[in-house]
Amino acid sequence: MTPPSRFKRRDFLVGGALAGAALGGSIRGGEARAGVDDPSTDRKPLPFRECYCPAHFGNSYEAMWPRERAAHLAELKAMGFNRLGDWLVTTDARDPYTTDKAWHLGRVQLERKKQAFRDARALGLDLNLIVTPNHVYLDQLRPELEATKSSKIFGQLLCPSRPEARKIILNNFVHWCDDLADAGLRLSAFTAFAYDYGGCDCEACRPWVLTFARLMKEIHALAKERHPDIEPWFCSWWWTPEEHALVNDWAAREAPGWLQGMTMHIEYGQTHPKEVEVPEGCRKLAFVHIGYPDERSPEVYGRQGAVIAPNRLPKTLDELRARGFEGFQAYSEGVFDDANKAILAGLADGRFGSADEAMRAYAERYLGAKAESSKAWAAWLTRWGDAKSVPLPAAQTEFDRLAADAKPGWRLEHWRVKLEMERLDRAIGRPKPDEWTPEQLANADAWFATQEHLYRDIYRLGPVRHVLHPSFQPPSWRDSWIQATQAAPAPASPPDPSEA
Ligand SMILES: [Zn+2]
């Protein structure tokens, strides 16, 4: 048997299109060009269009092999992103710079991240290093150095007000900055998160955001030695308006003109960040969660396959432009949000004026659609902004018609699964623990089997953790199902492992 060539594998990964070609070329040259040749000011590209793809928790970015990741990065660029962010996550890992084995989790994750950064750089993408400064490796935790925890302060945390702990924290940054520089990489920025994971609630560290800001200023001075152009950015994930005010006062007093970017969290259900001031000279950017549809639902993080937010994301971009934001970090936990990436990046770089246009180009590039079917695909895809309003079985009939001529691949399959999981979810309904019928129990079993097929066969994932874990934000009938099935008699014999 002839081994598949790299090009064939590349075709499989991205669906047959050429790497790096602009998504939507056919729209530019085709009939649907109204408005594209004469962009209005609201189509002006936003300068910072980052896809933040933390490779962690068993998600797609952690699971992808190097060539697969490189092919995917080329698609991010084709969609309109110009910057890649990844988090140097220390969760569950030992210090890769002191471990005696090259195949430990910490080392393997770090090597993959470095390779992804190299591939992104080769494509011309800028690099942003996401950091949570006082979250350290497992073997660096010592009881006398540990941080004081509270409701939003958790994880493998050291207290940076203790000199020994601060030394460990700074040393991690020296290792990372040297290692990345030695790999030929130059970072454009770091974006530091104060929380999730981060923080210390001890007397000496309060107020935490100021300890955090001072720590990051010290780290920035170290980082500049090997990455002279690195800009200090903060992400205000979980910050209160009072914490913003504290940092603004600190910046004016102790660090005027130092902070270059503030990435502001947009909460669920909102299309712009809270109205808060940023320090003088600091860019405003938005942290845009693309892992859920128009409204928050159990679909978040791809529980039921693909997600799309055809109303929320264009509205978000309009509001960001109107408020003087210079760009965004699109927060992505896997490839299930592929349609959202194409909408957000394609509208932000000005090539598309609507989600519908973006989805027509998407269908042509990835699903092999021709002009007529791309229109039908865009209409079908954008209905899923609100899954509960999608008419069934009509949407199934339309999908089957369109899919018959579509290019095969995971992008087609995760929508097929979405339909099936939605159909099963509706058939299950919301029974109380004592109301489950045999049909509903069979449908719940089919729902779990379909989800497993999604994670394993389509997204090709292994053990997923944290927010990717299926028990995080489960379907609303799950608790009832657990109660109903726990009460049921145990099977007479264990299942046959050969059927697994
Ligand atoms: Zn402390």
Image (cartoon, helix red, strand yellow):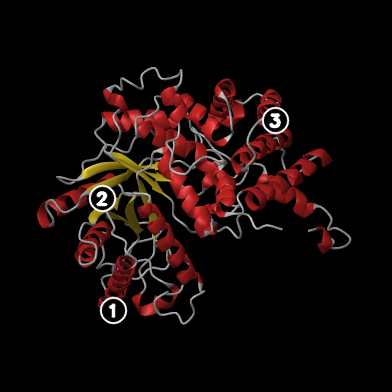
Q: Using the rendered image of the protein, determine whether residue 292 is visible from the camera's viewpoint.
A: no
Name the residue carrying label 3. Answer: 404
Residue picked out by circle 1: 164
Quick one: label 2 or label 1, which is nearer the N terminus?
1
Whether disc 3's CB lies below 8 Å from ligand 1 is answered no
Q: How far apart are marks 2 and 3 (CA)?
A: 54 Å
Does the residue at mark 2 contact the one at mark 3 (Cβ under 8 Å)? no
Secondary element at image label 2: helix
Could you say where residue 309 lies in the image, as x and y percent from the top left? 48, 33
Q: Nearer the viewer, mark 2 or mark 1?
A: 1
Quarter of image, ligand 1: bottom left
- Of the residues shown, which amino acid type is indicated by label 1? Glu
Residue underneath mark 2: 243
Q: How crowded is mark 3: few (under 14 residues within 10 Å), some or many (20 or more)?
A: few
Say if 36 sits above or below 134 in the image: above
Q: Residues within 10 Å of mark 2 (few under 14, many from 20)?
A: some
- Decide if residue 290 is on the left or right side of residue 174: right
- Counting from the top left corner in percent of width and height, residue 255 is at 13, 56
What's the distance in space between the residues labelled 3 and 1, CA to CA?
63 Å
Measured along the vertical axis of the image, is residue 473 above or below residue 392? Answer: below
**Which quadrant, please, contains the C terminus?**
bottom right
Q: Nearer the viewer, residue 260 or 486?
A: 260
Q: Nearer the viewer, residue 255 or 123?
A: 123
Specify whether 442 is left or right of 357: right
Mark 2 vs 3, N-terminal side: 2
Q: Position of residue 302 (x, y in %)?
A: 56, 44
The residue at the point 39 percent across, 76 percent down is 97
Q: Residue at x 27, y 54 (%)?
A: 188
Disc 3 or 1, which lies upstream in sequence?
1
